Image (cartoon, helix red, strand yellow):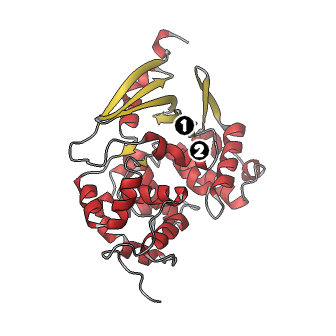
Amino acid sequence: MSDARAAAEFAVRIETPRRDARGAIDPAASLEMFRRVGDDLIDRWDGRTLLRTHTIGTRTIAYACAFASDHHGLTINVTIEDVRQREAIEDAVRTMFVTPGAEFIALVQSDRVIGVIAAAHPGVRSVRQSNLLHALIRCISAQQVNLRWAATCRRRLAGSFGREHRLGEHRVYSLDAARLAALEPAAIRALQFTTRKAEYIINVARALAGGELTIAALAAMSDDEVIARLTAIRGVGLWTAEWILARTLGRPRVVAGDLGVRKAIGLAYCGGAMPAAGEVHRLTAAWGAAAATAQAMLLHALAEKTLPPGRMAANAPQLRPR
């Protein structure tokens, strides 16, 4: 490796805002979503080191993050495989966690359900997925199957068609849009994806390979415009588009049609009754700009089986009878 392409190490510091009485970011709890469903070789978290890749133009760069928290903030020690890409990777790392503003502190005080969850899991944050191809494939693979099986299928995809990146003793894989776009559906179907999912993966890969779809372009659009742009691709529905809004663009979007979100809202607010998507929107309307953090905390509490009992708070919204 030439000096120009030598690996580099640097630290990113994220200070805890003085107004954030709930403490600094808890990276381990926030990232546990990746380990909980199984290692897909793409977003790799072993409890100590996070391994990911980020696409910059036509290049994909791997990076590793190790975390050290204190009462005043979070230090992220980063290793990247190409020193020339430090600025772009530093930006991706710095914005990895969606940090709550004053709206979240107000929500904690006004909504006792969120207050209880925030006290139990104070540092949980929504984790942004800045590799758009990976984020879309993550959603497509998880359509109508359990998340563990989806991770198994992504692992097979990465192992069969991905590129391996090495950072010291660590390795992580990236998927290339042009390579996937050139495949026949049968090649992906052989990995135990359904035929339709294989076609959908190729469809999104073609959109990205042709330069028609970029994070920068989506970031300049309104939520409705993002949804319209993404759902124009065969295989991308509202559910996928909303997760891209929430986890790639970091927007305060509640994914009301998601089964996990509906279950968590039902347990926390509705005495266990499963709300429809429309009811989820109504029940979470007060989350406002704090929706990303509230949603991440609720899903984490669901996985950890620490959701408070439904209707525990006098101010908790009620499920309308059908």
> Residue 25 appears at what percent x and percent y?
37, 42
**Residue 92 vertical placement versus 293 (above, below):** above
Foreground pick, 129 / 275: 275
What's the residue at 53%, 35% (across, down)?
A: 52
SS under mark 1: loop
Q: Residue furthest top?
A: 3
What's the residue at 45%, 70% (across, down)?
A: 309
Foreground pick, 185 / 93: 93
> Residue 257 appears at what percent x and percent y?
50, 69
**Residue 41 vertical placement versus 37 (above, below):** above
- Say whether disc 1 or disc 2 marks the residue closer to the N-terminus: 2
- Direction from residue 51 to residue 123 in the image, left or right: left
- Direction from residue 19 to residue 2 in the image, left or right: right
Which residue bears the numbered disc 1? 47
What's the residue at 53%, 49% (across, down)?
A: 33
Q: Which quarter of the rendering shows the N terminus? A: top right
Q: Amino acid at mark 2?
A: Arg
Asked if residue 44 can be seen in this view, the reply is yes
The numbered dot on residue 267 is: none
Q: Residue furthest right?
A: 190
> Residue 231 appears at what percent x and percent y?
49, 63
Asked if residue 257 can be seen in this view, the reply is no
**Contact (CB < 8 A) between labels 1 and 2?**
yes
Q: To which quarter of the image does residue 35 belong? A: top right
Q: CA distance from mark 1 to mark 2?
A: 8 Å
SS under mark 2: helix
Q: Amino acid at mark 1?
A: Gly
Which residue bears the numbered disc 2? 35
Foreground pick, 13 / 43: 13
Q: How many marks?
A: 2
What's the residue at 22%, 53% (across, down)?
A: 102
